[in-house]
Protein backbone atom coordinates (compact mmCIF):
# COMPACT_ATOMS: atom_id res chain seq x y z
CA UNK A 1 0.00 0.00 0.00
CA UNK A 2 1.11 3.54 -0.74
CA UNK A 3 -0.40 6.83 0.44
CA UNK A 4 1.47 9.55 -1.43
CA UNK A 5 0.83 13.13 -0.39
CA UNK A 6 3.32 14.26 -3.02
CA UNK A 7 1.34 12.63 -5.84
CA UNK A 8 -2.03 12.93 -4.10
CA UNK A 9 -2.55 9.22 -4.69
CA UNK A 10 -3.57 6.12 -2.70
CA UNK A 11 -2.54 2.71 -4.04
CA UNK A 12 -4.78 -0.10 -2.77
CA UNK A 13 -2.64 -3.20 -3.10
CA UNK A 14 -4.45 -6.45 -3.93
CA UNK A 15 -3.08 -9.99 -4.32
CA UNK A 16 -1.55 -11.58 -7.44
CA UNK A 17 -2.01 -8.58 -9.73
CA UNK A 18 1.66 -7.51 -10.21
CA UNK A 19 1.11 -5.21 -7.22
CA UNK A 20 4.60 -5.65 -5.75
CA UNK A 21 6.33 -4.65 -8.99
CA UNK A 22 4.07 -1.63 -9.38
CA UNK A 23 4.60 -0.64 -5.76
CA UNK A 24 8.38 -0.72 -6.21
CA UNK A 25 8.10 1.40 -9.36
CA UNK A 26 5.71 3.93 -7.81
CA UNK A 27 7.85 4.32 -4.67
CA UNK A 28 10.54 5.90 -6.88
CA UNK A 29 8.30 8.95 -7.22
CA UNK A 30 7.19 9.20 -3.58
CA UNK A 31 8.19 11.96 -1.19
CA UNK A 32 9.75 11.86 2.27
CA UNK A 33 6.43 12.18 4.10
CA UNK A 34 4.61 9.55 2.06
CA UNK A 35 3.46 6.23 3.54
CA UNK A 36 5.02 3.23 1.79
CA UNK A 37 4.63 -0.26 3.26
CA UNK A 38 6.98 -3.24 3.19
CA UNK A 39 6.60 -5.92 0.47
CA UNK A 40 8.76 -8.83 1.60
CA UNK A 41 12.47 -9.45 2.04
CA UNK A 42 13.19 -9.71 -1.70
CA UNK A 43 10.95 -6.82 -2.70
CA UNK A 44 12.39 -4.47 -0.07
CA UNK A 45 15.94 -5.50 -1.01
CA UNK A 46 15.24 -4.73 -4.68
CA UNK A 47 13.80 -1.33 -3.78
CA UNK A 48 16.86 -0.59 -1.63
CA UNK A 49 19.27 -1.64 -4.36
CA UNK A 50 17.52 0.62 -6.87
CA UNK A 51 17.57 3.51 -4.40
CA UNK A 52 13.85 4.21 -4.77
CA UNK A 53 12.69 4.28 -1.14
CA UNK A 54 14.89 3.29 1.83
CA UNK A 55 13.72 0.46 4.08
CA UNK A 56 14.39 2.64 7.11
CA UNK A 57 11.44 4.85 6.12
CA UNK A 58 8.94 2.05 5.41
CA UNK A 59 5.67 2.13 7.34
CA UNK A 60 4.80 -0.64 9.81
CA UNK A 61 1.25 -0.82 8.42
CA UNK A 62 0.14 -3.98 6.64
CA UNK A 63 0.84 -3.93 2.91
CA UNK A 64 -2.53 -5.32 1.83
CA UNK A 65 -4.96 -3.14 3.75
CA UNK A 66 -8.54 -3.21 2.44
CA UNK A 67 -10.05 -0.04 1.03
CA UNK A 68 -12.51 0.43 3.95
CA UNK A 69 -9.61 0.22 6.44
CA UNK A 70 -7.51 2.73 4.51
CA UNK A 71 -10.54 5.00 4.48
CA UNK A 72 -10.55 4.89 8.30
CA UNK A 73 -6.82 5.68 8.46
CA UNK A 74 -6.89 8.89 6.46
CA UNK A 75 -8.97 12.04 6.74
CA UNK A 76 -12.18 12.39 4.68
CA UNK A 77 -10.47 15.19 2.73
CA UNK A 78 -7.59 12.89 1.67
CA UNK A 79 -9.90 9.96 0.84
CA UNK A 80 -12.25 12.08 -1.24
CA UNK A 81 -9.63 14.12 -3.10
CA UNK A 82 -6.68 11.76 -3.66
CA UNK A 83 -6.68 9.52 -6.72
CA UNK A 84 -7.33 5.96 -5.54
CA UNK A 85 -5.59 3.34 -7.72
CA UNK A 86 -5.78 -0.46 -7.68
CA UNK A 87 -4.59 -3.30 -9.93
CA UNK A 88 -7.09 -6.00 -10.95
CA UNK A 89 -6.88 -9.29 -12.83
CA UNK A 90 -8.98 -11.77 -14.77
CA UNK A 91 -10.32 -14.13 -12.03
CA UNK A 92 -9.58 -17.26 -14.06
CA UNK A 93 -5.97 -16.21 -14.54
CA UNK A 94 -5.62 -15.13 -10.92
CA UNK A 95 -6.62 -18.59 -9.69
CA UNK A 96 -3.82 -20.11 -11.77
CA UNK A 97 -1.28 -17.60 -10.48
CA UNK A 98 -2.50 -18.08 -6.91
CA UNK A 99 -2.18 -21.84 -7.20
CA UNK A 100 1.46 -21.76 -8.31
CA UNK A 101 2.31 -19.09 -5.73
CA UNK A 102 0.82 -21.24 -2.98
CA UNK A 103 2.59 -24.32 -4.37
CA UNK A 104 5.96 -22.59 -4.09
CA UNK A 105 5.25 -21.57 -0.49
CA UNK A 106 4.39 -25.16 0.39
CA UNK A 107 7.61 -26.41 -1.23
CA UNK A 108 9.64 -23.81 0.65
CA UNK A 109 8.10 -25.03 3.92
CA UNK A 110 8.76 -28.69 3.05
CA UNK A 111 5.07 -29.62 3.32
CA UNK A 112 4.28 -30.05 -0.37
CA UNK A 113 2.48 -33.26 -1.34
CA UNK A 114 1.89 -33.32 -5.14
CA UNK A 115 -0.47 -36.29 -4.75
CA UNK A 116 -2.86 -34.18 -2.66
CA UNK A 117 -2.23 -30.59 -3.69
CA UNK A 118 -3.51 -29.92 -7.19
CA UNK A 119 -5.12 -27.08 -9.10
CA UNK A 120 -8.46 -28.85 -8.70
CA UNK A 121 -7.97 -29.04 -4.92
CA UNK A 122 -7.02 -25.36 -4.75
CA UNK A 123 -10.12 -24.14 -6.61
CA UNK A 124 -12.50 -26.42 -4.70
CA UNK A 125 -10.98 -25.38 -1.39
CA UNK A 126 -11.48 -21.70 -2.15
CA UNK A 127 -15.10 -22.35 -3.06
CA UNK A 128 -16.17 -24.80 -0.36
CA UNK A 129 -14.82 -23.09 2.74
CA UNK A 130 -14.49 -19.54 1.39
CA UNK A 131 -11.00 -19.54 2.90
CA UNK A 132 -9.52 -17.49 0.06
CA UNK A 133 -5.82 -18.12 0.41
CA UNK A 134 -3.65 -15.02 0.27
CA UNK A 135 -4.21 -14.88 -3.46
CA UNK A 136 -7.96 -15.55 -3.47
CA UNK A 137 -9.99 -13.51 -5.95
CA UNK A 138 -12.95 -13.05 -3.60
CA UNK A 139 -10.50 -11.81 -0.97
CA UNK A 140 -9.46 -9.13 -3.46
CA UNK A 141 -13.10 -8.24 -4.07
CA UNK A 142 -13.67 -7.58 -0.38
CA UNK A 143 -10.57 -5.40 -0.27
CA UNK A 144 -11.36 -3.44 -3.43
CA UNK A 145 -14.95 -2.53 -2.56
CA UNK A 146 -16.47 -0.16 -0.07
CA UNK A 147 -20.18 -0.72 0.44
CA UNK A 148 -20.40 -2.92 -2.68
CA UNK A 149 -18.95 -0.21 -4.92
CA UNK A 150 -15.43 -0.12 -6.37
CA UNK A 151 -13.39 2.15 -4.09
CA UNK A 152 -10.70 2.87 -6.70
CA UNK A 153 -10.96 5.76 -9.16
CA UNK A 154 -8.44 4.19 -11.57
CA UNK A 155 -8.00 0.46 -12.28
CA UNK A 156 -4.83 -1.03 -13.76
CA UNK A 157 -5.93 -4.15 -15.61
CA UNK A 158 -3.39 -6.99 -15.53
CA UNK A 159 -4.31 -7.89 -19.12
CA UNK A 160 -3.51 -4.32 -20.23
CA UNK A 161 -0.68 -3.36 -17.87
CA UNK A 162 1.39 -1.26 -20.26
CA UNK A 163 -1.62 0.60 -21.65
CA UNK A 164 -3.12 1.43 -18.25
CA UNK A 165 0.16 2.34 -16.52
CA UNK A 166 0.96 4.65 -19.43
CA UNK A 167 -2.40 6.39 -18.91
CA UNK A 168 -1.73 6.70 -15.18
CA UNK A 169 1.77 8.03 -15.88
CA UNK A 170 0.25 10.95 -17.77
CA UNK A 171 -2.57 11.42 -15.27
CA UNK A 172 -0.26 11.86 -12.24
CA UNK A 173 2.64 13.35 -14.20
CA UNK A 174 5.20 10.63 -13.36
CA UNK A 175 7.28 10.44 -16.52
CA UNK A 176 9.00 7.09 -16.93
CA UNK A 177 6.68 5.16 -14.60
CA UNK A 178 5.94 2.48 -17.21
CA UNK A 179 9.62 1.93 -17.98
CA UNK A 180 10.42 1.78 -14.27
CA UNK A 181 7.69 -0.83 -13.79
CA UNK A 182 8.97 -2.93 -16.69
CA UNK A 183 12.46 -2.95 -15.16
CA UNK A 184 11.30 -4.22 -11.74
CA UNK A 185 9.85 -7.71 -12.11
CA UNK A 186 9.27 -8.72 -8.47
CA UNK A 187 8.13 -12.37 -7.99
CA UNK A 188 8.59 -13.31 -11.63
CA UNK A 189 9.19 -16.91 -12.70
CA UNK A 190 6.89 -18.62 -10.18
CA UNK A 191 4.32 -19.71 -12.75
CA UNK A 192 5.52 -22.08 -15.51
CA UNK A 193 5.36 -20.65 -19.03
CA UNK A 194 3.28 -23.58 -20.26
CA UNK A 195 0.55 -22.93 -17.64
CA UNK A 196 -1.40 -20.57 -19.88
CA UNK A 197 -4.99 -19.60 -19.24
CA UNK A 198 -6.37 -21.67 -22.11
CA UNK A 199 -4.10 -24.65 -21.48
CA UNK A 200 -5.09 -24.91 -17.81
CA UNK A 201 -8.84 -24.63 -18.29
CA UNK A 202 -8.88 -26.92 -21.31
CA UNK A 203 -7.54 -29.56 -18.89
CA UNK A 204 -9.73 -28.44 -15.98
CA UNK A 205 -13.26 -27.64 -17.25
CA UNK A 206 -14.78 -28.53 -13.87
CA UNK A 207 -12.65 -25.91 -12.15
CA UNK A 208 -13.88 -23.27 -14.60
CA UNK A 209 -17.43 -24.26 -13.70
CA UNK A 210 -16.66 -23.85 -9.99
CA UNK A 211 -15.25 -20.36 -10.59
CA UNK A 212 -18.33 -19.48 -12.65
CA UNK A 213 -20.54 -20.58 -9.77
CA UNK A 214 -18.47 -18.63 -7.24
CA UNK A 215 -18.97 -15.36 -9.09
CA UNK A 216 -22.59 -15.89 -10.04
CA UNK A 217 -23.29 -16.14 -6.31
CA UNK A 218 -21.55 -12.80 -5.69
CA UNK A 219 -22.39 -10.90 -8.89
CA UNK A 220 -24.86 -8.61 -7.14
CA UNK A 221 -22.60 -8.08 -4.13
CA UNK A 222 -19.52 -6.64 -5.84
CA UNK A 223 -19.63 -4.09 -8.65
CA UNK A 224 -16.38 -5.32 -10.24
CA UNK A 225 -17.76 -8.81 -10.95
CA UNK A 226 -20.71 -7.53 -12.95
CA UNK A 227 -18.55 -5.09 -14.91
CA UNK A 228 -15.56 -7.26 -15.82
CA UNK A 229 -15.98 -10.93 -15.00
CA UNK A 230 -18.66 -11.67 -17.62
CA UNK A 231 -16.38 -10.29 -20.35
CA UNK A 232 -13.51 -12.57 -19.30
CA UNK A 233 -15.91 -15.53 -19.07
CA UNK A 234 -17.10 -14.99 -22.66
CA UNK A 235 -13.52 -14.66 -23.96
CA UNK A 236 -12.39 -17.87 -22.26
CA UNK A 237 -15.38 -19.87 -23.47
CA UNK A 238 -14.90 -18.70 -27.04
CA UNK A 239 -11.31 -20.02 -26.89
CA UNK A 240 -11.80 -23.38 -25.15
CA UNK A 241 -15.46 -24.07 -25.85
CA UNK A 242 -18.30 -24.50 -23.38
CA UNK A 243 -19.79 -27.84 -24.37
CA UNK A 244 -17.91 -30.20 -22.06
CA UNK A 245 -21.07 -31.20 -20.20
CA UNK A 246 -24.78 -31.08 -20.77
CA UNK A 247 -26.78 -28.49 -18.83
CA UNK A 248 -28.11 -31.22 -16.51
CA UNK A 249 -24.59 -32.45 -15.68
CA UNK A 250 -23.43 -28.92 -14.97
CA UNK A 251 -26.35 -28.22 -12.64
CA UNK A 252 -25.85 -31.51 -10.81
CA UNK A 253 -22.16 -30.78 -10.21
CA UNK A 254 -22.68 -27.15 -9.15
CA UNK A 255 -25.52 -27.91 -6.74
CA UNK A 256 -23.60 -30.80 -5.17
CA UNK A 257 -20.78 -28.35 -4.45
CA UNK A 258 -23.20 -25.80 -3.03
CA UNK A 259 -24.60 -28.49 -0.75
CA UNK A 260 -21.10 -29.32 0.52
CA UNK A 261 -20.43 -25.63 1.08
CA UNK A 262 -23.62 -25.33 3.12
CA UNK A 263 -22.68 -28.42 5.17
CA UNK A 264 -19.31 -26.88 6.00
CA UNK A 265 -20.97 -23.60 6.97
CA UNK A 266 -23.36 -25.48 9.26
CA UNK A 267 -20.54 -27.50 10.88
CA UNK A 268 -18.48 -24.37 11.44
CA UNK A 269 -21.48 -22.56 12.96
CA UNK A 270 -22.18 -25.41 15.37
CA UNK A 271 -18.53 -25.59 16.45
CA UNK A 272 -18.53 -21.89 17.30
CA UNK A 273 -21.82 -22.11 19.21
CA UNK A 274 -20.50 -25.09 21.20
CA UNK A 275 -17.21 -23.24 21.91
CA UNK A 276 -15.10 -26.02 20.42
CA UNK A 277 -11.40 -25.01 20.68
CA UNK A 278 -9.79 -23.58 17.57
CA UNK A 279 -7.23 -26.40 17.37
CA UNK A 280 -10.03 -28.99 17.23
CA UNK A 281 -11.86 -26.93 14.57
CA UNK A 282 -8.72 -26.86 12.42
CA UNK A 283 -8.32 -30.65 12.69
CA UNK A 284 -11.98 -31.21 11.79
CA UNK A 285 -11.73 -28.87 8.82
CA UNK A 286 -8.67 -30.73 7.55
CA UNK A 287 -10.53 -34.06 7.75
CA UNK A 288 -13.57 -32.60 6.01
CA UNK A 289 -11.45 -31.26 3.16
CA UNK A 290 -9.47 -34.48 2.88
CA UNK A 291 -12.71 -36.46 2.44
CA UNK A 292 -14.59 -34.14 0.07
CA UNK A 293 -11.72 -32.74 -2.02
CA UNK A 294 -10.40 -36.08 -3.22
Image (cartoon, grey):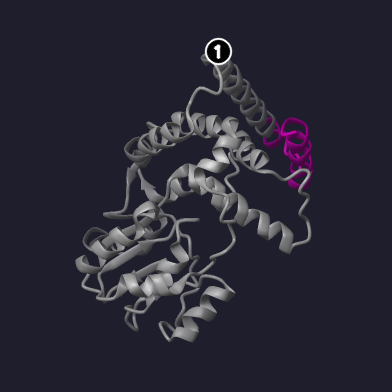
As drawn, is 104 to the left or to the right of 54? right
Q: Is the magenta region chiefly helix, strand or loop?
A: helix
Q: Quadrant of the N terminus?
A: bottom left
Which residue is depicted at the point 60% across and 16% down? Answer: 252
Quadrant of the rendered structure where residue 167 is? bottom left
Element on which disc 1 rests:
helix
Closer-to-camera residue (254/62)? 254
Residue positioned most to the top? 248
Residue appearing at x 45%, y 84% in the figure: 50
Check the picture and name the quadrant holding the C terminus: top right
Left or right of 200 on screen, residue 141: left
Location of residue 119 (image quadrant): top right
Total residue callouts: 1
Q: Which image quarter: residue 115?
A: top right
Q: Residue at (35%, 59%) from the top-left corner?
A: 161
Which residues are drawn in magenta? 270-294
**Residue 180 included in the magenta stretch of the image:** no
Amino acid sequence: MIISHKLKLIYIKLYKVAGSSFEVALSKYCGENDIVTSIDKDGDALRDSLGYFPSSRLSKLAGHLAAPRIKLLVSPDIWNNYLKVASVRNPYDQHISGYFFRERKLKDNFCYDPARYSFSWYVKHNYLVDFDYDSGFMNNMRRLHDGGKIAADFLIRFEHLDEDIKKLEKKINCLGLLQTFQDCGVKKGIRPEEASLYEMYSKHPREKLIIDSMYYENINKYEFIGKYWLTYKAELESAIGNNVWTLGEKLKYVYSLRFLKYVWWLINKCMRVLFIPQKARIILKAQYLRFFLR
